[in-house]
Amino acid sequence: MGSIEERAKENSPAIQVENVSKIFQTSKQGNVLALNDITLSVPHGEFVTLVGPSGCGKSTLLRLIAGLSSLSSGRILFQGAEVRELNTKVGYVPQESKLFPWLTLEENVGFGLDARRYAREERESRTRHFINLAGLNGFEKHYPAQLSGGMSKRASIIRALAYDPPVILMD
């Protein structure tokens, strides 16, 4: 049995979105309200899908949870801690592959492992494992421009999975 803090964390939502609004300021249209007073709770272990028409704010909400954009109002908690900057505890897969063009496939996949200070051997082993899992072996030294669209998408997904985050946000 874990500590009181560990049990409280397990019983609290993985993601808590409280009264979140996001306004984009544009030069042509002025202020554009993307999200208005959104409240959402995602329990640990749940699989949740955001559904809505194009332009309704699904991607914006995921970017806010990932800490890639700032809130206009409200707050977001991830595992009980307020998200105020880049949320390095989540895996984020954007709509576009967004691989770093100056890094090879294996360097892109291992990118998140470097930030978490994995030992070199563990980093290499995990990178190889996920590249193999995605059927990309043989392309380790290739740059994103040398990969097909599907290969780039798979690389983007395994980059998010490689460091074993507790939550994956897929746009």
Image: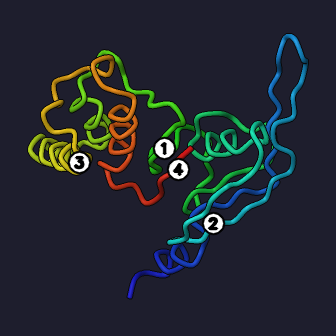
Q: Residue 42 placed where, x, y %? A: 63, 66
| Quadrant position of the C terminus in the picture | top right
Toward the viewer: 38 or 128? 128
Q: Tell me the CA gap for discs 3 and 4.
A: 18 Å
Q: Which mark is residue 130?
A: 3
Q: As shown in the figure, which amino acid type bears the numbered disc 2?
A: Val
Mark toward the start of the polypeptide (4 vs 2): 2
Q: As shown in the figure, which amino acid type bears the numbered disc 1?
A: Tyr
For label 2, the residue is 42
Q: Is residue 151 above or below residue 89?
A: above
Q: Residue 5 placed where, x, y %? A: 50, 75
Mark toward the start of the polypeptide (3 vs 1): 1
Q: Which mark is residue 169?
A: 4
Q: Tell me the CA gap for discs 4 and 2.
A: 12 Å
Q: Tell me the CA gap for discs 1 and 2.
A: 16 Å
Mark toward the start of the polypeptide (3 vs 4): 3
For label 1, the residue is 92
Toward the viewer: 16 or 148? 148
